[in-house]
Image (cartoon, rainbow, N blue to C red):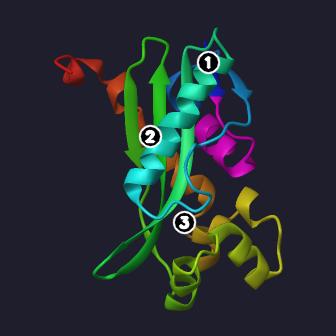
Amino acid sequence: MKIVICTLNKAKNDAVKNVISKVWSDVEFISIKTESGISEQPMSDQESIQGAINRAKFGLKQIAAADYSIGLEGNVDENNFGMFLNGWASIINKKGKIGLGCSGKVELPIKISEQLKVGKELGPLIQELMKDNSIRNSLGTNGVLTKGLYTRTKEFEDAVSCALAKFVNENMYKSE
C-alpha cells in the first residue's frame, strides 16, 4: 500500500506513520511538499479543513499510484472564550472518499493571539519567542504551551486517527 504524506514536516510525518502503522502493515510512505491554497496562517477551522483537503488532493495528483493521500493543516480558531490552536487531517483514498479529523485544541495566550490578529504567523512567532527554529518539526506550539504534554506529533496523531474512521469502519459510513 502506498500512502502520500503531503508535508515534509517531521512532526507531522511521525504522526501519520505512528497512526497508520497501528492500522496497516506493509505500507510505503511517500512524503512530498504540497501547497494548501489557503493563507499562511489559517484563522478558522473551515479554512484549515479546505487546506488539508487541497493538500491531499494535490498528493493524489502527484503520486498516481497512491492508495491514500493525507493532508495536514494547523490553524487557530477564535470563539467567545479565546483563541485556540488545533490541527486538521484530510485522508483521501484513490476513489475520492474523504475522511476528516481534528485534534484537541490548546488555548493561546492573549499576547500571542493579539499578534495573530494583526497578521503574524504562529510558527515564526513562537520560534522568535523561544529562540528555537526547530519547534515546528518537534514540540510545536502545543508542546511549548503544555510543557510537552500535548506535542505537535500528538496533535496530528489525534487528527489522523479521527480522519481514519471512514476507512477503518466502512460499514458505519456505507450510506455516505
Q: Quadrant of residue 96?
A: top left
Q: Amino acid at mark 3?
A: Tyr
| Res. 68 image quadrant | top right
* Image quarter (top left, top right, bottom left or bottom right) of the C terminus: top left
Labelled pair 1, 2 in contact (Cβ < 8 Å): no
Answer left or right for 165 relative to 76.
Answer: left
The amino acid sitting under disc 2 is Ser
Residues in magenta? 5-19
Q: Residue furthest top?
A: 65
Label 3 near label 2: C-beta < 8 Å?
no
User: Percent from the top left, x then y, of residue 142?
Assistant: 57, 69
User: Does 125 sit above or below residue 56?
Assistant: below
Dot 2 corresponds to which residue? 161
Where residue 42 sits: x, y (%)? 52, 60
Badge 1 is on which residue?
Answer: 61
The chief SS type of the magenta part is helix
> What type is the residue that disc 1 sits on?
Lys
Determine the secondary structure under disc 3. loop
Work out how far the residue at label 1 is from the one at label 3, CA to CA, in angstroms.
Answer: 33 Å
Using the image, determine if residue 107 lies above or below residue 176.
Answer: below
Disc 3 target residue: 150
